[in-house]
Amino acid sequence: MLSEFLYSDKALELDIDNEIAEGDHLENLRSLCVELLQPLRNALGVGLYRSSGYRCPALNEAVGGVATSQHTTGQAADVYCRRQFAPIDIARMVVSLRLPFDQLILYPTFVHLSLTDGDNRGQILYNKSYQGPKV
C-alpha cells in the first residue's frame, strides 16, 4: 500500500508533506514492492514492516539522510520483522532467493534494501553499528 511508504512520524512531527512529486518515483516504489519486497514477504511467511520508505528531499534532510539517498527516488526501504526473523535472517533470505537488489545494508534492527531500474550492484554492506554475523 502506497500510504505505508509515504507515512513518517518525523514528517508529521515537522509538518513536512512527504508526497511523491515525480511520476517515476511512484514506478520505482512499485518495482521495489513487486520485484523485491513482496517476494521476500511471501518467502518469510510473516509480516515485513517498513521503518522508512519514500522520503521527500525535506524529510530526507530532516532525518540526516545523504543527498543521494535512494529513499528520495522511491528505490529503497528499511524493513524488519517484529519477532520471527532478525535482520541477518532477512538478509540471508534475500540472498538465498536470489532476489534482485542494488544495496542490502545490515543495521542492528533493520535491513536497508534498494532496487534500481538499471544495473543493480548487489552490494552487501554493514552499518558501523552492526556487530552481528555476516551474510
Image (cartoon, rainbow, N blue to C red):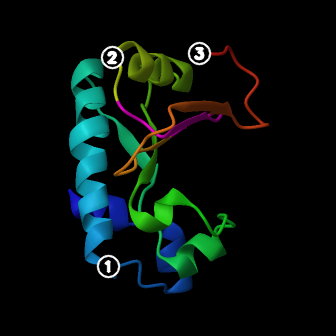
Q: Secondary structure at mark 2?
A: loop
Q: Are marks 3 and 2 in contact (CB under 8 Å)?
A: no
Determine the image quadrant of residue 3. Answer: bottom left
Tell me the kind of residue under disc 2.
Leu
Rendered view: 14 above or below 26: below
The disc at residue 97 is: 2
35 within the magenta span: no
Depth check, front residue: 25 or 47: 25
Q: Residue at x 52, y 22 (%)?
A: 86
**Looking at the figure, which quarter contains the N terminus?**
bottom left
Tell me the kind of residue under disc 1.
Glu
**Left or right: 22 as drawn, with respect to 124:** left
Determine the image quadrant of residue 39. Answer: top left
Residue 93: image x %, image y %? Answer: 40, 17
Tell me the kind of residue under disc 3.
Val
Disc 3 or 2, which lies upstream in sequence? Answer: 2
Count up the numbered dots: 3
Depth check, front residue: 135 or 14: 135
Q: Which residue is mark 1?
A: 22
| Separation of marks 1 and 2 at Cα, in angstroms | 31 Å
Rendered view: 38 above or below 84: below
Rendered view: 62 above or below 52: below
Residue 52: image x %, image y %? Answer: 47, 55
The disc at residue 31 is: none
Q: Is residue 110 visible?
A: no
Q: Secondary structure at mark 3?
A: loop
> Is the residue marked by circle 1 packed among few (<14), some (14-19), or many (20+) residues within 10 Å?
few
Please give the range of residues in magenta: 100-112
